[in-house]
Image (spheres, grey):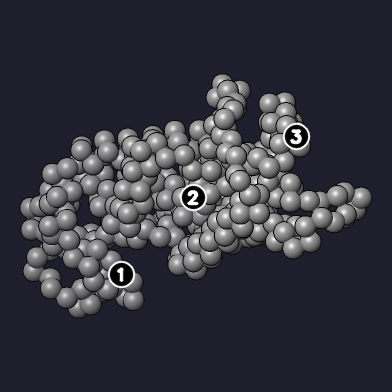
Amino acid sequence: MTALSAENCSFQYQLHQPHQPLDVNCLLYLIILGKILLNILTLGMRRKNTYQNFMEYFCISLAFVDLLLLVNISIISYFTDFILLGIRFTKYHICLFTQIISFTYGFLHYPVFLIACIDYCLNFSKTNKLSSKCPKLFYFFAVILIWISVLVYVLGDPAIYQSLKAQNVYSYQCPFYVSIQSYWLSLSMMLILLVAFITSWSEVITLIQAIRITSYKNETILYFPFSSHSSYTVSSKKILLSKLVVCFLGTWLPFVLLQVVILLLEVQIPAYIEMNIPWLYFVNSFLIATIYWFNCHKLYLREISLPADPFVNWKCCFIPLTIHNLEQIEKPISIIIC
């Protein structure tokens, strides 16, 4: 087993000696195929009425790169040994391409998180959703630029280049890479979520006990009956925090528990698996909740165009106990996009 220094690059490097390279290639093919099916399922389940943003474009690009990797693995596995454009391709290149993709994925977590955060911050105060093609072109070229930049960095890093070059000598060895970026990002998110849950513990329990799920104007909403003197009609960051925690955990609780298990057991997942679309949408929901909380004073302004989440329904309404049928009123009282 060899290891690259964490100070020089944001990943951990581990080397495993398989007995039969064909078995490794087949396993790799099945893993990538399963990941692509998961990508398709996740993209198919998301809400289609959300406006365009950077994270949406990057998720689609990630699905495309995964598909491209699967196609390359399939072609090389089928022809085994062939020459294309003067370059000889063998089964060694299956491992090589996967290593390059793993390195690239491993360095993408921080940039994607940062750019998505900046994107939401810049778009939060806009009064109208932009329908022109300029934002779409901007997101398209931004995604291409980040992929090219990270790939150039990976291929130009001396330590990474030497590790890839060394595999020519040990052709039966195929190392995988574990991203340090994803570990620290996941750990930070879990700690913040834990602090938020502890801070609003009593409010969260009260909300869960009073929660009701219904349909209003063909849209599923959560509503909470309250008395006319209820403190939950007060606009404050603490009250909003409890609503955000309930909405977030109501959708992502299984994924949160999975992240906790991975962190506690220190499970090392290869970067080409760990960077996936469900993880990106999980991060996306976390970012939206954070933006909502920091801008709680703007949530009640009707002219503000709020970020829409493809998975979490952040719409909550608080209505008086005297109203029993939401469809009987034109609009529920105190609708809060939390």
Q: Point out the tag, 2 or 1, that comes first from the N-terminus.
A: 1
**Gap in angstroms between the C-alphas marked 2 and 1:** 24 Å
In the rendered image, residue 225, in percent from the top left (x then y), is placed at: 13, 62
Q: Which residue is mark 1?
A: 220
User: Residue at image x 73%, y 32%?
Assistant: 166
Q: Which mark is residue 169?
A: 3
Q: From the viewer's perspective, is the residue at label 2 or at label 1 nearer? A: 2
Q: From the viewer's perspective, is the residue at label 3 or at label 1 nearer? A: 3
Asked if labels 3 and 2 touch by Cβ distance under 8 angstroms, the answer is: no
- The answer to whether residue 20 of the structure is visible from this angle is yes
In the rendered image, residue 324, in percent from the top left (x then y), is placed at: 13, 73
- Under circle 3, the secondary element is loop
Query: Horizontal placement of 81 versus 29: left or right?
Result: right
Tag 3: amino acid: Val
Q: Which residue is mark 2?
A: 280
For label 1, the crowd category at 10 Å Cα-Cα, with few meaning under 14, some 14 to 19 and many 20 or more, is few
Farthest residue to the right: give it: 86
**Gap in angstroms between the C-alphas marked 3 and 1:** 59 Å
Quarter of the image for residue 312 reads bottom left
For label 3, the crowd category at 10 Å Cα-Cα, with few meaning under 14, some 14 to 19 and many 20 or more, is few
Tag 1: amino acid: Thr
User: Residue at image x 23%, y 77%?
Assistant: 327
Q: Which mark is residue 166?
A: none
